[in-house]
Amino acid sequence: MARAGRVIARGTQDRLTRDLPGELRLRLEPGAGLAALPASIAGRATVTGDELHIITTSPPADLAAMLAAGYAPVWVDVRRPDLDDLYRALATEYSHVA
Protein backbone atom coordinates (compact mmCIF):
# COMPACT_ATOMS: atom_id res chain seq x y z
CA MET A 1 0.00 0.00 0.00
CA ALA A 2 1.34 3.43 -0.91
CA ARG A 3 0.59 6.95 0.21
CA ALA A 4 1.96 10.10 -1.40
CA GLY A 5 4.25 7.97 -3.55
CA ARG A 6 5.76 6.19 -0.54
CA VAL A 7 5.23 2.53 0.41
CA ILE A 8 3.67 2.44 3.90
CA ALA A 9 2.69 -1.25 4.08
CA ARG A 10 3.81 -4.34 2.26
CA GLY A 11 2.69 -7.97 2.47
CA THR A 12 -0.21 -10.29 1.86
CA GLN A 13 -3.74 -9.35 2.82
CA ASP A 14 -3.72 -11.95 5.61
CA ARG A 15 -0.48 -10.62 7.07
CA LEU A 16 -1.49 -6.96 6.82
CA THR A 17 -4.94 -7.45 8.37
CA ARG A 18 -3.99 -10.06 11.01
CA ASP A 19 -3.90 -7.62 13.95
CA LEU A 20 -6.82 -5.44 12.91
CA PRO A 21 -10.13 -5.85 14.71
CA GLY A 22 -13.00 -7.55 12.98
CA GLU A 23 -16.58 -7.88 14.09
CA LEU A 24 -18.59 -10.56 15.87
CA ARG A 25 -22.30 -10.25 15.11
CA LEU A 26 -24.90 -12.05 17.18
CA ARG A 27 -28.66 -12.22 16.86
CA LEU A 28 -30.27 -12.94 20.21
CA GLU A 29 -33.75 -14.08 21.12
CA PRO A 30 -36.18 -11.15 21.34
CA GLY A 31 -36.19 -9.80 24.87
CA ALA A 32 -32.80 -11.34 25.73
CA GLY A 33 -31.78 -8.09 27.41
CA LEU A 34 -28.32 -6.66 27.09
CA ALA A 35 -27.93 -5.19 30.57
CA ALA A 36 -25.65 -8.01 31.74
CA LEU A 37 -23.07 -7.97 28.95
CA PRO A 38 -19.65 -9.14 30.15
CA ALA A 39 -17.55 -6.13 31.20
CA SER A 40 -14.84 -7.11 28.70
CA ILE A 41 -17.36 -6.70 25.87
CA ALA A 42 -19.71 -3.91 26.95
CA GLY A 43 -17.49 -1.05 25.77
CA ARG A 44 -17.02 -2.59 22.32
CA ALA A 45 -20.62 -3.58 21.65
CA THR A 46 -23.37 -1.78 19.77
CA VAL A 47 -26.89 -2.82 18.90
CA THR A 48 -28.16 -2.45 15.34
CA GLY A 49 -31.73 -3.61 14.87
CA ASP A 50 -31.90 -7.09 16.34
CA GLU A 51 -28.14 -7.69 16.14
CA LEU A 52 -25.37 -7.19 18.66
CA HIS A 53 -22.12 -6.06 17.01
CA ILE A 54 -18.85 -6.53 18.92
CA ILE A 55 -15.57 -5.07 17.65
CA THR A 56 -12.99 -7.77 18.35
CA THR A 57 -9.56 -9.16 17.62
CA SER A 58 -10.61 -12.50 19.16
CA PRO A 59 -14.09 -13.61 18.05
CA PRO A 60 -13.83 -17.06 19.72
CA ALA A 61 -12.97 -15.54 23.11
CA ASP A 62 -15.77 -12.99 22.90
CA LEU A 63 -18.30 -15.61 21.81
CA ALA A 64 -17.19 -17.82 24.71
CA ALA A 65 -17.65 -14.88 27.11
CA MET A 66 -21.17 -14.29 25.78
CA LEU A 67 -22.06 -17.96 26.17
CA ALA A 68 -20.58 -18.06 29.69
CA ALA A 69 -22.72 -15.02 30.59
CA GLY A 70 -25.80 -17.03 29.66
CA TYR A 71 -26.55 -15.60 26.23
CA ALA A 72 -27.76 -18.09 23.63
CA PRO A 73 -27.49 -16.50 20.18
CA VAL A 74 -29.74 -17.82 17.45
CA TRP A 75 -27.32 -16.60 14.77
CA VAL A 76 -23.59 -15.83 14.78
CA ASP A 77 -21.42 -14.25 12.10
CA VAL A 78 -17.77 -13.21 12.10
CA ARG A 79 -16.56 -10.47 9.80
CA ARG A 80 -12.81 -10.56 9.38
CA PRO A 81 -10.96 -7.32 8.66
CA ASP A 82 -10.54 -6.60 4.96
CA LEU A 83 -8.51 -4.22 2.81
CA ASP A 84 -10.95 -1.36 3.50
CA ASP A 85 -10.26 -1.77 7.22
CA LEU A 86 -6.52 -1.79 6.51
CA TYR A 87 -6.79 1.38 4.43
CA ARG A 88 -8.75 3.17 7.18
CA ALA A 89 -6.24 2.06 9.83
CA LEU A 90 -3.26 3.19 7.77
CA ALA A 91 -4.91 6.46 6.76
CA THR A 92 -5.54 7.22 10.43
CA GLU A 93 -2.04 6.19 11.45
CA TYR A 94 -0.38 8.26 8.74
CA SER A 95 -2.77 11.23 8.79
CA HIS A 96 -0.12 13.36 10.49
CA VAL A 97 2.39 12.65 7.67
CA ALA A 98 2.38 15.25 4.91
Image: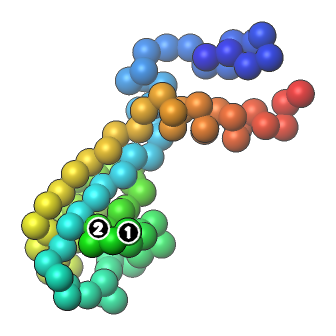
Does the image show residue 41? no
Depth check, front residue: 87 or 51: 51
Q: Quadrant of residue 36?
A: bottom left
Q: Position of residue 66 (x, y in %)?
A: 22, 71
Residue 76 picture quarter: bottom left
The colouring scheme, among rainbow, by chain, secondary structure or one colour, is rainbow
Q: Is residue 96 left or right of residue 32?
A: right
Q: Which residue is rendered at x = 44% and y = 46% of the image?
A: 21
Picture coordinates of residue 20 (x, y %)?
47, 40
Q: Which amino acid type is shown beneath numbered disc 1?
A: Thr
Q: Secondary structure at mark 2?
A: strand
Contact, CB < 8 Å: mark 2 with mark 1? yes
Give the residue at mark 2: 51
Label 1: state its secondary structure.
strand
Q: Position of residue 24 (x, y in %)?
A: 30, 55
Which residue is labeled 1 in the image? 48
Residue at 42% across, 21% down: 13
